[in-house]
Structure formats: C-alpha cells, structure tokens
Image (tube, rainbow, N blue to C red):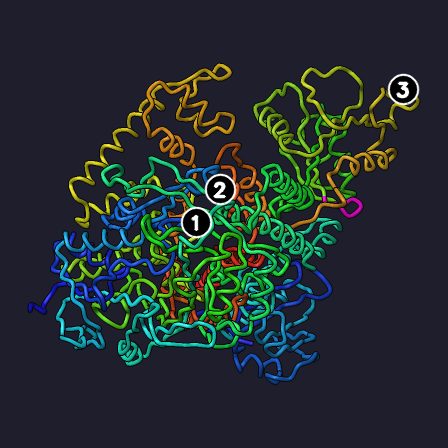
Amino acid sequence: MAVVEVADKIDTIYALATPSGRSAIAVIRVTGTSIPKKLLEKLSLQKNSRGCFVRKIDLGDYSDKCLVLNFPAPESYTGEHLIEIHCHGNPVIIADVFTLLDGYGVEEASPGDFSKRAYLNGKVSLDEAESLMLGIQAQNKNDLISLEKFRSGDLGQKIFNISNSLESLLVALESQLDFSDEDGVSDLERNEIAKNIEQILHDLKRLLKNYRPIRDLEARQRAVIIGPPNVGKSSLFNRLLKEDIAIVSNTPGTTRDVVRKTIVMEGIELEVNDTAGIRNGETLVEQEGIEKSYKALDGAEISIWVSDQESNFKNKPKTDLLVMNKIDLFEGRTIPKGWIPLSAKTGEGMNVLVEELIKKLNVEESVFYTSERVYGNIEKTVKTLSASSNEKDFYEINAQNARDALILLKEIYGDFDNEKILDQIFQKFCIGK
Amino acid sequence: MNNKFDLIVIGGGHAGVEAAVAGRRMKLDVALITLDQEKIGRMSCNPAVGGIGKTHLAREIDALGGVIAEATDLSGIQFKTLNKKKGPAVQALRAQTDKNLYEKTIQSFINEFGIHVIEDEVEDFCEKNNKIISARGKRGEYFGKSFVLTTGTFLNGSILIGSKKVDGGRIDEKKSTGLERYFLSKDVTLGRLKTGTPPRLSKKTINFRGLEEQPGESGLYMSFLGQKNQHPQQTICHITRTNPETHKIINRDIKKSAMYSGLISGVGPRYCPSIEDKIVRFSEKKDHQIFLEPEGIDSDWMYPNGISTSLPKETQEEYVQSIKGFENAKILQYGYAVEYDYIDPRNMSKDLLFKKSDNLYLAGQINGTTGYEEAGAQGIIAGINASLNVLGKEKWVPQRSSSYLGVLVDDLTKFGVSEPYRMFTSRAEHRLLLRQENADERLFESAKKLNLLSEERIEAFHQKQRKKQKVLVSLRGNSINLTGKKVTLYDLCKRSDFSEQDVFKLNPDNTSEFTAVYYDAKYSGYVKKQEREIEKMKTLDDFSLGLIFDYQEVVGLSGELKEKLNYHKPQTLLDASKIEGITPAALNVITIHAKKIDAIRS
C-alpha cells in the first residue's frame, strides 16, 4: 500500500475521537507514516506489534491507566501507523495527554484529516468517502439504512442501467446521422426516439425523487413553537426536551430570543425552536424578540401554535398544529375542533402531540441519500435531455443532447468514449458500400 | 535544373496537392516530387468526393484556399445532398466525379500555380541535427527548407488478389521503398493497414434495364465560389443488389480470399468492409446494396460501390455475374486489397510535424487515415505549417471547437489509430456548430491571416456575409406580440413552437441566407455552452498539478493511466486532460487528489 509522502507536510497528527466533556472513557487517535520513536518508547510499543496493551501513562505529577491499541501500517483506518489511546474521560486528563503528544511534535488534526488520509492511502474510495461523510451527518435511522444502499452500489447500478439505455439511444441516433445513406441502416421513426427519451427521463426523474443530496441532510427538520405570551410555550418546549433549558417564568415576555434544541423522536432528529410570545410588545427589546419569532417560522417544516384559550388572536399566523395548553387548570371545558388538548405541566396529551409531529415530519421510507455531486449530475442530465426539437434537426439535436447527457452520467462513475458508440454501430449495422 | 526549393512535397495524391497549393499561396517556391506526373490527383478508390463528415472537411479545405472542392465542381457529373431530411449540421453534399476530368483539373491547377513537378522516387533524406537538408531520389537530390511527405499506400505497399501478393501501391504501379529506413533510424515503428477496392466493370456490358435509378440534383456546388466553376454534363447512377446466389459463391470460396487466408496482416476499416466481410459478419442479410458509379461521362469504366474484395479472379467473375444487371458484365480490373505502412500519428504534433524532425511534415494515409478529404485536410494543414516553418512564423493548429480539421488532427495525434481513420460527424462534440455551410465563416480569419485567400474568395465571403447580415438585422429589428409580450423574430428562432417556415414568413427582409441565419440563432445556446467549456479549459490550465509527485498514489486511476501520468508529469490539469486515455472521471480523481495534498500541506 502506497503511502502519501509530501515534502514538509505535517506527518503525525492526533485527535479526540469521542465527544468532549466528561465520560467514562475518552479515545485519542494518533496517526502518521512515522510516529516519533520517543513516543513509541513512552508508550512501550513495538512499532510492528499489532495488539491491545494496558499502559500506565505518566502525565507528570500523576498517571492514568490507559488501554493502548497499536495498528501498524497499512492495516489501519488511515493506512498509516495508527495508535488509539483510551484514557479516562476527564477533560484534565485528556488535556494532559494532548500536552504530552504536543511534546513529541505531534500536532492536533483538523476536522476530516483522518478520513482524508484514509482516502489518500486508498483505504476508502471516493464513493465510500462520500458515504462516510454521510454516515456522520445521518440524522435518523432511515438515513443510515439508505446509506447502506448507497454503499452497496445500488444507485450505481441504476445509473449504469440508465446510461446503457442512453447509449443505445445514441447509437440509434448516430446511425441515422452518419450512416443514413447506408443500406444496412433502416429508418428510425421520430416517435420511436421520443418514446425512448421519455422512458429515460422518467427513470432519471424517479432517481431524483427517490434520492436526496447531502445538502438536504445537513439541514435538519425544524419545528417552531409560537403563540401569545405566557401560554406555556417554554413549558411545552421543555416537556418536549424532557429537560430544563429555556427560562421558564410567570412574567410574560421572558423568552426574547429563539431557543433551539434538537430532540430525537422515534429515530428522527428534529430541531425544536422556542420563540418569544407574540403581542404588541411594550419594550423595544420585546419587539425585537417578537420579530425574531415570526422570522423563525420561515423555512420551518412544522409550526405549532400554543394558546390557553380559543380567543381570536389578531396576528395569529397560519400554523400546522394548534395546541390548547394548561388543560390541568381548566378541567372539563370543551376543546374546539382541530386543537390538541394537553398539559405541558403534567404531560397529559403529550403523546398525541408527538404522534402528530411524527405524522407531519417528512420521512419517506423510500428516500435514499447520495452525494451532491452525483445528484447534481443527474439533475443536469434531466435538463440536458429535456430540450428537444420538432424540426428537421430533430435527430442531431437529440443526438447532441443524448451525448451531453451521457457524458454527464458517465462522469459519475466512468467515462465517455465515442469509439464505443461507433463500435456498436458497426456491430449492429452492416455499414459500407 | 534547379534543385533548390523552399518547400518540397513528396507525393502527388490528394494530400500532396493541397500541401503544394498552400505553399504557393503563401508565396513559396514549391516542388512536387511524384512517381508519375500523369497520375497527380488520381482517385484510386471510388470516383466521388464528399459524404457525411467528409464534405465538412472538403468545404473547410476550400475555405482555406484548397483545390478539392473547385476540382469537384469542375469535374462532378452528379451532385446530391445527403441527409436532406435532417438539419443543416449533418447535411452533406456528395458528388460523383469524372475520374479522368478530376485529375486533369487538378493537374492544370498545379500548372497554373507554378508548382515545379519532378518525376522521381525519393529514397532517403539527408539530415543534419534533425533538420532535413535534402530529399534523395533515384534521379537526383532536392534541397528544401521544409518537407511534406505524403506516401499514400505506396510506402511498402502490396497488392493482394486471392493468394497472389505483389509489390505496389496501386494496381500495376510500383511501390516506393527506402523511406521506411529513415523512420526506422528514428526508432519509429511502422504499422500496417489495409484497404480494398471492387472489381471495375465495363459499362457497355452491363444491362441497366430494371435497375433502380438514382438521379442527381442541380444548382449544388462544393466550393464557396459556387457558380464560378460550372459543372460538366450530368448523369444518373444506378443501384443493384447482391443475392443469395452471390453469397453462396463467396461463402464457397471464402478461404481463397486474401483476407481469410491469413495473407493480410493489416487492419482494414470497419466502415468499409469487403463483400466477404459483410457476408460472414451479417450472414442473416439476404442481399447487399451496390451503387453503380460511372468513372466518367465518356468512360467505359464502372465502379460498383459495395463489393470490394480480395477473392481470386475466377471467383470475382463468378459472383459478379450472379448479380442482376451484371449477367454479362466484363471485369476491366479485378478487385484487390492493398496493404501499406503507416506511422502512428501520435508521432506527430498537431501541426503534423514529425516530432523527431524539425522540418518534416506528414499527411494522408501515412498517418493512418483513409479518404481523399481526410488526406487533403492533412495536406493543407501540413502544407501551411511547413510553409510557416520556412517563413519562420508560429505554427497554425486548427481547433476542435471550430473545425473538423481540428477534430481530425486532435484525434489522430492524441489517440492514434487502430483502423484507417475516417471522419464522422459524431466525432465532433460541437457538431451543431460545425456545418458545411459555415466552414468559410469558421476559418475566414485564420485563412486571411495566413494569406491563403484570393481577392475573389474574400469578395465572395463578404458578399455572403452581407446577405446574412441583412437577415440578421431584420430578425433582430422585428418582433411580434406573444401573450402580451414583445418577442423579437431572432428569439423566435430559438423556440420549439415556431418552425423555420413560421419565422421565414414573419420576417420581412429575407435573402437566400435565411436558413443559415435561422440556425445560427437557433443554436446560439450551444455556442454559449461551447464558450463555457473553453472557459473551463482555461480553469484547467490554472490548476497546478506540480505537487503530485507519484501518480501510483492516486486512488481510482487505472494502472495504465498512472504510468502515463508519471511519464508525462503534467504541470496543469489541462496538460493532464490532453494525455491520451484521460477521461473526465480520471480528471476528477486527479483534481481531488491534488486538493487533498494541498489541504494536508496547508
């Protein structure tokens, strides 16, 4: 396995592989083509002995008993020599291990460095690198399932099939152009070609429908809680979060900024926004907060209007869900149709709200993810192939479009070769006077 | 006799002629050395010029002041537009020529241009520091500043009929030898290609009754000079077909064909198979079409296009007579295959300079192509550049984006050939823009700068442009109301809901150039796309690959590409894109690799 060697580059890098903060164990990874000898001595590791070792690492005034995993090159994630140090998950210990590594000339990695090296050293392909990226960004179980399909080359096969049809179309069209004077080539009707293109476009559009580019994945779905002041929006927010994040008080107008938090419901990630109460605010600060509340609605997948009474609110925006809060205070009263009765305080009715939220969330079972590059090329292919002509130049316009479309599709996984088109024409038709 | 010239062209075929004419247009003293001056401009294969893709080349040669199109107009006995039911980008004018009249016309051009014709066989070059000083022939030595070599099928040519193999570049003509030593001394391996011809029949022994007739059209001209060169008397052609009996005879004797007996090692063109090949490869086909092309108005020779062969003479006689109309046909010349040496065109740079020499240019079949138009196209490029070399000026390389000439030299020098190379419109990625009707426009600036155009041609060009301008002004200046919006007629040309006829009727100021302008407008979107691609190329040029030291590290490239890239060590992505076999996908991978290295370093 070849290993990248670039003059002057930083060779050995380290990074914390587990989330920062307090935890039972923290994992620090170190990788490089030549990890400093002194560091290996410090960890009592033989360069080429693959395995798992218990080591008491001296951190100056104290020591930490760590598990050290040694992966000699090239059988490692990055393809380079890689060491994992599993120390105890105390930020102080972690910081001291970092200091120790710094002392040996090892530098802290930038985000993505480990994967970058894995890619450069041939441990992962471009496709895998793309799916790896997706894996980290995946936000629900469906994303992960769809990734599996991406990794297994499902989309690749589909694109391959479509480019085959496109290639046959181009062969047919080209034979009508360069060899129309040949006896061996029979005329191909326009509607035959049009039908062919229609089918290919249909297949491509289905891909566009069933797959989504990563860019959509980065933007997680959002629900905004909005309503008049002091109706219990923050209580509802906290109930959803099942922890105290927002400031909850009885004085109207305390949530001036939008508070955001991400929750996971039945495997789906959802960002919930708590907003300031809407009314004609008395102070400038409150006015600003109200404006922010309205703004938070832009682009949100779900909006939840919370109130504690049915009164007509002048500035009520159109929302997806209507919640009647504080039912514990007004027992036995009639709930208007279309409203979800609940008590953020007791949790009564929350299950109904969660059910409604999940229903509204955009989770199509059949949607799979692909990289933006692949998706973009499919989009461009559709656009290219859609332009047609009804005139004399019908054949060459469609040939040009089919050719350009094929180049776009082939760019995804392979390459375009005009010789292959000619080859097929000569195989299929008896050309030559 | 004077034996010192500026430019020496060796070979008097279609490549040599255009090279010599270009040299004279550029005011050089030019010598044309050929085996037999009576055969300058001879059509060794079928008596026709043009075809889809080929006409595009012929018109481009014409736009550069070449002679192929004018000679065709002066000797054409039938003209026809191919792909008439399709759009202008793939339409092509094809002409049947009077073979004799064609070569006489070419010979009179050579004479008029004041080209020194020398009959001799060049056997060697005298060279000093990669610069050729002289060409040594059997009869003398010829000194020149620059040389164009066009050997056609004569370099180590052999003629094959059945089991007989004789030396020669054309039937009953000797081959040329000696020059291969020059290339071998340069460490260049010669490849072998083959081509074939059908038996030629005596017109008066053919029974035309009952054969399908193919009439021509009037008012069509190959050259942009149009009516200046009037056609001779016109004629009609005929079509007949082979039948199961013909196939039975050929199948019976297939092993006797030079093609199938193992006598031939050269690779023949896929698009021009022999009748043996057609019958073997498409055995399900019960008959094959044969075009009967007269070699001249007064000539008794007929060229039955579609039955080229290397079967023995007796079999040729038998199968010919099994064909309708040929029952009593007499063969004037038997069909034969010809094998010849060629040089891998990757040994040439895009100006067709042989890379291992400072002043030797190669054109035509020696570069692995087939066809008069392909030969002429290279001839004019080689002639222009050999002349520029003499004048000490920068070379001229036609571009893919603006001409089939560019497609031709780019394909040849980048990919080499695996069979005799023929032009097809599908080879041009900007096909919609490279039309036979606008070849003059596409090459005018270059041609003018290179001093290739006579006053007459410049005037003809401007006259056409004035006609186009008139239409354009009218299309831009007039508009109609469409659902409350004003739309210019020019913009209507781009819409699929308006036909050419619709716009024509709406346009108040029309000339004979309407169609050309209409399609210029209609395809303007493709011009923009092309410009974007050229722009993209520039970006590629700005992308440095200097940091990639070893392509073995680049994941996702084939072993072959890695080796090529390591060999060439391209400085920029553009350099890399020019390496043979590099695909867009490969460029993508290289780009990502370069970016990652960059990222690691920074």
Q: Secondary structure at mark 1?
A: helix
Disc marking residue A334: 3
In the rendered image, the vertical position of residue A233 relative to residue B391, given as above or below: above
Q: Amino acid at mark 2?
A: Glu
Instruction: Please name which of the two marks, 2 or 3, marks the residue nearer to the observer.
Output: 2
Residue for point 38% across, 20% down: B507
Judged left or right of residue B512, residue B4 is: left
In the rendered image, the vertical position of residue B181 relative to residue A18, given as above or below: below
Query: Dot 2, crowdedness within 10 Å: few (<14), some or many (≥20)?
Result: many
Q: Secondary structure at mark 3?
A: loop
Which quadrant of the structure image shows residue A331? Answer: top right
Judged left or right of residue B295, residue B385 is: left
User: Quick check: is B525 in the magenta stretch?
Assistant: no
Q: What secondary structure characterizes most of the magenta part?
A: strand
| CA–CA distance in space, label 2 to label 3 | 70 Å
Count of numbered labels shown in the rendering: 3
From this viewpoint, is residue B508 visible?
yes
Q: Amino acid at mark 3?
A: Thr
Residue identifier under label 1: B425
| CA–CA distance in space, label 1 to label 2 | 10 Å
Q: Amino acid at mark 1?
A: Thr
What chain does mark 2 sit on?
A
Residue identifier under label 2: A396
Q: State the extent of the magenta-drawn residues as a range.
A: A265-269
What chain does mark 3 sit on?
A
For the C terminus of chain B, the quadrant is bottom left
In the rendered image, the vertical position of residue B430 relative to residue A119, given as above or below: above
Query: Which is more toward the observer, B572 or B48?
Result: B48
